[in-house]
Image (cartoon, rainbow, N blue to C red):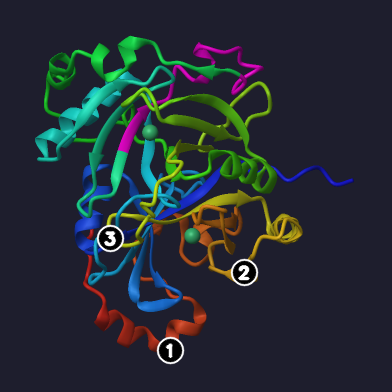
């Protein structure tokens, strides 16, 4: 018997931008991520596909954007992502982010104490909801580390809206301006992704059965104290892997479906180690009756796509070959890269794209 398939966590998340230069200014210049690949949407070559990441493009730290200038504004709802959380070291570096963002004119809420981490919320220029979350203290604060996700945990009153001192939270910030992203505050990639479902049990069974994730926390939304909020992650019964937590809010009975578009997540991608493991995933998913695409060559990884039962578009992407496959590692993101079959159209494609500022 082969070992059961368990994803290591997220590979990347893909969102929709209406303005590539503005997205570059926000994610590279303000949030300090590296542009690791400048290419086009292989299914729509007149549109940019920008990849941001840490320096080298490690899976789990990758944020990508399709640029669709005429896309209508999307809306979050069932079958869609509500927000993306990026990690930072601790409460101190989180406050530095609050100061840096507010000084840049970005409206920020928090930091709110979620128990397992502290959270700061804001939106990107297209309206995508973002969070910066502290690395810890982690999910073992109210359950044993080797038995996470067992109890339904009621958050203590001081973490609920009525128990918070909103004025004190709003006033809290770093005392000095933060003109540069310091090494200590550098964003650590995907901390968690939170989505909305109308069937928590079915969605959870899919995350467990299809992707090999495990339930690590059953609690309530700490902004209303009522809505169930469950967390799944890559968990071996001891440690919760970084870049692997998918959380679901229970919107049972809701008719508000997610509407794709600007300011929304297009899809989320999980990791397969290599091509061989990806084919095993494809077989496994088909065996569960899931409609899966053929393997598509995305140059930097290979991809299969499918939908969760509530409609959330998912991908499994391989760790290899990575972003250094078509330009030197030291020059990632510096020039427009095209797959071989689009090279004959380079001049025409370059004319259709807005030039992006170099750093
Ligand atoms: Fe969150
Ligand atoms: Fe993708």
Q: Name the residue under label 2.
A: 293
Q: Does the magenta stretch include residue 142?
A: yes
Q: Name the residue under label 3.
A: 262
Quarter location, residue 178: top left
Q: Which residue sits at x=66%, y=17%?
A: 146
Q: Where is residue 232 in the image (x, y as percent from the top left)?
A: 56, 34
Task: Characterize the magenta stretch by its predominant secondary structure.
Answer: loop
Please tell me which of labels 2 and 1 falls first in the chain: 2
Quadrant of ligand 1: it is top left
Query: From what the image shows, is residue 291 above or below residue 126?
Result: below
**Which quarter of the image is occupied by the C terminus?**
bottom left
Disc 3 packing (10 Å; few <14; some 14–19; many ≥20): many
Helix, strand or loop at mark 2: loop
- Side of 222 relative to 291 (left or right): left
Please tell me how many numbered marks the rendered image carries: 3
Quarter location, residue 122: top left
Q: Is residue 156 magenta?
A: no
* Marks 2,1: beta carbons within 8 A: no
Of the pair 156 and 123, the residue shown nearer to us? 156
Residue 309 in view: yes
Q: Position of residue 91 (x, y in %)?
A: 31, 19
- Side of 218 relative to 104 (left or right): right
**Region of the chain picked out in magenta, as a range:** 131-150
Helix, strand or loop at mark 3: loop
Disc 2 packing (10 Å; few <14; some 14–19; many ≥20): few
Q: Which residue sits at x=36%, y=23%?
A: 222
Disc number placed over residue 344 in the picture, else none: 1
């Amino acid at each position: 018997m082969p070992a059961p398939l368990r994803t290591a966590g997220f590979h990347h998340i893909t969102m929709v931008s209406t303005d590539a230069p503005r997205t570059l200014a926000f994610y590279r210049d303000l949030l300090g991520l590296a542009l690791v690949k400048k290419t086009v949407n292989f299914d729509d070559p007149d549109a940019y596909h920008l990849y941001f990441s840490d320096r080298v493009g490690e899976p789990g730290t990758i944020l990508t954007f399709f640029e669709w200038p005429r896309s209508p504004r999307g809306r979050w709802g069932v079958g869609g992502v509500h927000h993306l959380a990026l990690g930072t070291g601790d409460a101190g570096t989180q406050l530095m982010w609050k100061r840096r963002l507010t000084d840049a004119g970005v409206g920020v809420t928090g930091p709110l104490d979620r128990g397992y981490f502290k959270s700061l919320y804001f939106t990107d220029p297209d309206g995508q909801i973002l969070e910066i979350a502290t690395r810890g203290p982690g999910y073992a604060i109210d359950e044993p580390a080797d038995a996470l996700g067992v109890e339904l945990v009621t958050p203590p009153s001081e973490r609920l809206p009525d128990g918070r001192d909103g004025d004190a939270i709003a006033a809290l910030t770093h005392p000095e301006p933060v003109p540069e992203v310091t090494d200590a505050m550098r964003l650590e990639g995907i901390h968690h992704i939170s989505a909305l479902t109308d069937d928590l049990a079915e969605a959870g069974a899919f995350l467990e059965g299809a992707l090999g994730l495990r339930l690590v926390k059953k609690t309530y939304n700490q902004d209303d104290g009522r809505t169930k909020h469950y967390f799944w992650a890559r968990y071996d019964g001891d440690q919760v892997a970084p870049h692997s937590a998918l959380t679901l809010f229970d919107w049972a009975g809701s008719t508000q479906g997610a509407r794709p578009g600007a300011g929304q997540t297009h899809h989320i991608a999980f990791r397969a180690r290599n091509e061989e493991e990806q084919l095993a995933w494809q077989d496994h998913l088909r065996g569960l009756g899931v409609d899966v695409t053929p393997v598509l060559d995305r140059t930097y990884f290979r991809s299969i796509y499918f939908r969760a039962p509530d409609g959330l578009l998912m991908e499994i992407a391989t760790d290899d070959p990575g972003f250094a496959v078509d330009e030197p590692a030291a020059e990632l993101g510096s020039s427009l890269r095209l797959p071989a079959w689009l090279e004959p159209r380079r001049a025409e494609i370059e004319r259709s794209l807005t030039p992006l500022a170099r750093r």
